[in-house]
Amino acid sequence: MNLSKLTIHEAHELLSKREISSEELTKAVLDRIDKVEEDIKAFLTVDKERALEISKKVDKEGDFSSPLAGIPVAIKDNICTKDLKTTCASKILANFVPPYDATVCEKLKSEKAVIIGKTNMDEFAMGSSTENSGFFATRNPWDVDRVPGGSSGGSAAAVAADECIFALGSDTGGSIRQPASYCGVVGLKPTYGRVSRYGLVAYASSLDQIGPITKDVTDCAMVLNAIAGWDERDSTSVNLPVPDFTKSLVEDVKGMKMGLPKEYLGEGIEPEVREAVLSAAGVFENLGACVEEISLPHTEYALWAYYIIAPAEASSNLARYDGIRYGVRAIDYDDLIDLYKKTRSEGFGREVKRRIMLGTYALSSGYYDAYYLKAQKVRTLVKADFDKAFEKYDVIIAPTAPTPAFRIGEKTGDPLKMYMSDVCTIPVNMAGLPAISIPCGFSGGLPIGLQIIGKPFDEATIIRAAYTFERATDFHTKKPAL
Amino acid sequence: MKITIETVEHVANLARLYLSEEEKAEMANTLSSILDYMDKLNELDTTDVPPTAHIIPLKNVFREDVVKESLPREEALKNAPEKERGFFKVPRIIED
């Protein structure tokens, strides 16, 4: 048996019965990394020695009551890990070693999960293909000439290639769901405020959220259980009771009302993707759900409002990279301003500079009302579309992305084309909603993702719908030939 | 909206970035075409629509003012590119 292929719940069962040890499982995952990493390049750092040491410690303690105990996890490299390099895939943070853990890492460690490494991403999470990494591009395990999606492309590729048992990503405009869709795995963006952002390197603070990337929906519920909850160190985390999400792993969508927005199935959506989503809707109907076409009229505007709001917040958040307190400092400089400018110009990649410029422009004197304020008003309209739909529907189903994974290099020359690959995921962040992407089909051997969007703080219902779909289909059991 | 090289230079200075001539030209082009798309937002009448800065109604969050352990100085300085005698080191900013 190849242990690296296991899900969390399968591994947990074997660990609990002492049929395998965490050390064996961790070794199997590290061997898998040795075998396929040259082709996939999902990791920026593999923390081999420490992972083995921790797995041995977990074995020795022998307490596998937590479902995550002894399970190898990969962490996106914008989530701080104490004493383990965290670069955001940026040259400006190439040597940054956090002196503290993000809350989610503290929580995983207290559940005795084994952190095996840090995954590649688009620099500062700005991108949709992981090609904007300051170090190297990650490849899609289903076709190494294609992108894994982004920005959490390393995490999604690592899960799909069995280079970890599960991973964490972050999602600002689709960065968990879109790569999960491209790599044929499960990715959940929780409701804004459900998971603490403490220790997540900020890109766009009003949109960022950490979430799980897993091999199936059961694992997704288990990881969300571990990472959700209020945190006094994140003033935007919400103090609401966290249900046990594994209680939602129930095969039942009878009477569930599902909206299918026509704006997500129109122009720009590839026919194979549309067909896969429509046949998923058919699966739900056969299982007793009621699916109806709806309209979310501001969908297209959400994309353009996002590309004002996110860069505006980014331009402010990234002002901190000045070469003073951490990160790489330029070598020759005349004075303080010159030091700032040289450090930032040498340290940031092209897309990061583009978004800083766009955001700075949108916030600058004379343009604030025309762009930033206007975008915030449009955000209100986008949210109102969803509020209205959720008066009548329990969930909304849609494609996660307009196409399957595109070719490496296909969109790097045209940022607008790249931005449009986020058109199906961005509105969800603008409205702060939870949404999951699960495999729902293939096109030319490439996975297609189904997105299920829920009401605020109602991850339970989207997990139930996703689990029911997963039990009725076998898309999640398919593995890339590597 | 056409973005000129002068505007690019002004914004780059605000953002504390140096751009090469090639980067400035590319940035002027790309920003112009991105902002053209942004103008689509003007199709919407938003006169009476309140802005949403944040999806959750945010209030000030207070906590008790109690003494707690903080990051040790050595740890806080660990990542500093230059440090001296327990301080971050920066170029001189005050003239003699």
Image: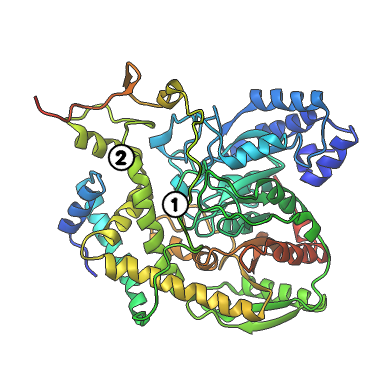
Residue situated in front as seen by the camera: A377 or A77: A377
The residue to which callout 1 is attached is A126
- Mark 1: which secondary structure? loop
- Please tell me in which quadrant of the rendered image residue A79 appears: top right
Q: Is residue A120 visible?
A: yes
At 74% from the left edge and 27% from the top edge, which residue is drawn? A55
At 81% from the left edge and 46% from the top edge, which residue is drawn? A9
Q: Give residue A411's position: percent from left, percent from top.
A: 44, 58
- Mark 2: which secondary structure? helix
| Residue at far top of view | B85
Q: Chain of mark 1?
A: A
Q: Give residue A323's position: percent from left, percent from top.
A: 32, 33
The residue to which callout 2 is attached is A344
Q: Give residue A128's position: percent from left, percent from top.
A: 49, 55
* Image-based side of B48 in relation to A364, left or right: right
Sooner in the amino-acid sequence: mark 1 or mark 2: 1
Label 2 neighbour load within 10 Å: few <14, some 14-19, many 20+: many
Residue situated in front as seen by the camera: A340 or A162: A340
Determine the CA span between mark 1 and mark 2.
16 Å
Label 1 neighbour load within 10 Å: few <14, some 14-19, many 20+: many
Whether A66 is drawn above or below A352: the answer is above
- Please tell me in which quadrant of the rendered image residue A321 appears: top left
Q: Chain of mark 2?
A: A
At 91% from the left edge and 36% from the top edge, which residue is drawn? A17
Q: Give residue A385's position: percent from left, percent from top.
A: 53, 78
Whether A470 is drawn above or below A244: the answer is below
At 50% from the left edge and 49% from the top edge, which residue is drawn? A130
Amino acid type assigned to the residue bearing label 2 in the image:
Arg
* Image-based side of A152 in relation to B9, left or right: right
